[in-house]
Image (tube, coloured by chain):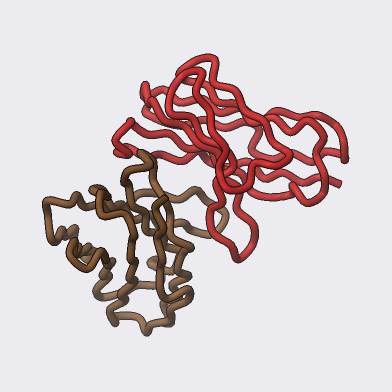
Chain colours: A red, B brown
Amino acid sequence: EAQVTQNPRYLITVTGKKLTVTCSQNMNHEYMSWYRQDPGLGLRQIYYSMNVEVTDKGDVPEGYKVSRKEKRNFPLILESPSPNQTSLYFCASSLSDGSGYTFGSGTRLTVV
Amino acid sequence: GENVEQHPSTLSVQEGDSAVIKCTYSDSASNYFPWYKQELGKRPQLIIDIRSNVGEKKDQRIAVTLNKTAKHFSLHITETQPEDSAVYFCAAYGSARQLTFGSGTQLTVLP
């Protein structure tokens, strides 16, 4: 089944403890992206990647890191999480022309 | 870069009535326009899309229209049902070579 897989689905952590949210797609998509979504707000882009070893900042990159060492994986790294990073996170991927844009199931992160 | 504006931000309709959500885009090179539906706590999912060489596309109760000259596109839902209640996002793919999303519309279908 074609899909974008995010892990974990739910995570509660403490301030300052490094964490990684994984994202993997099995559709051979060139493009991958991370978003955060807060209550009452839309999708805010954190980082995106056009292809392997190519990453760029989105609208809200502060406090986050990403890497794209393999085509299928695009992990989101929070080096020192803070409570204002409590949010619902989505990974997405697509072909280079934007078609097939698919979201993962989401990761609900709580930082206390 | 691309700017996509979506209106209204909230929309309430009576069950059985029609709902229309409108989006405008800024990049004249944009050529792909998908619409996503997001139910509470779930991921956004593609419901319909249209490419710039087509003016209208229908899929049962859902239709999308595109006016390239005016740079706007709209989602039309007819005979609305309670299960249509969700947040809807429009998006446009243009020169930036990635989708730019609108801010979303919360649609509520009242029984």
**Residue B32, how many percent across, how many down?**
26, 48
The image shows residue B82, relative to residue A72, as above or below, that is below
Q: Residue lying at the far top in this picture: please name it.
A: A70
Residue B88 is left or right of residue A20, and the answer is left
Q: Quadrant of residue A101?
A: top left
**Residue A94, how many percent across, how many down?**
37, 34
Labels in figure, total: 0
* Residue depicted at 40% across the width and 39% down the height: A102
**Residue B81, how many percent across, how many down?**
34, 72
Residue B81 is left or right of residue B44, and the answer is left
* Residue depicted at 58% across the width and 62% down the height: A41
* Residue depicted at 16% across the width and 60% down the height: B58
Q: Nearer the viewer, residue B38 or B32?
A: B32
The image shows residue A80, relative to residue A59, as above or below, that is above
The image shows residue A35, relative to residue B9, as above or below, that is above
Q: Quadrant of residue B95?
A: top left
* Residue depicted at 31% across the width and 52% down the height: B34
**Residue A53, how many percent across, how many down?**
51, 18
Screen quadrant of the C terminus of chain B: bottom left
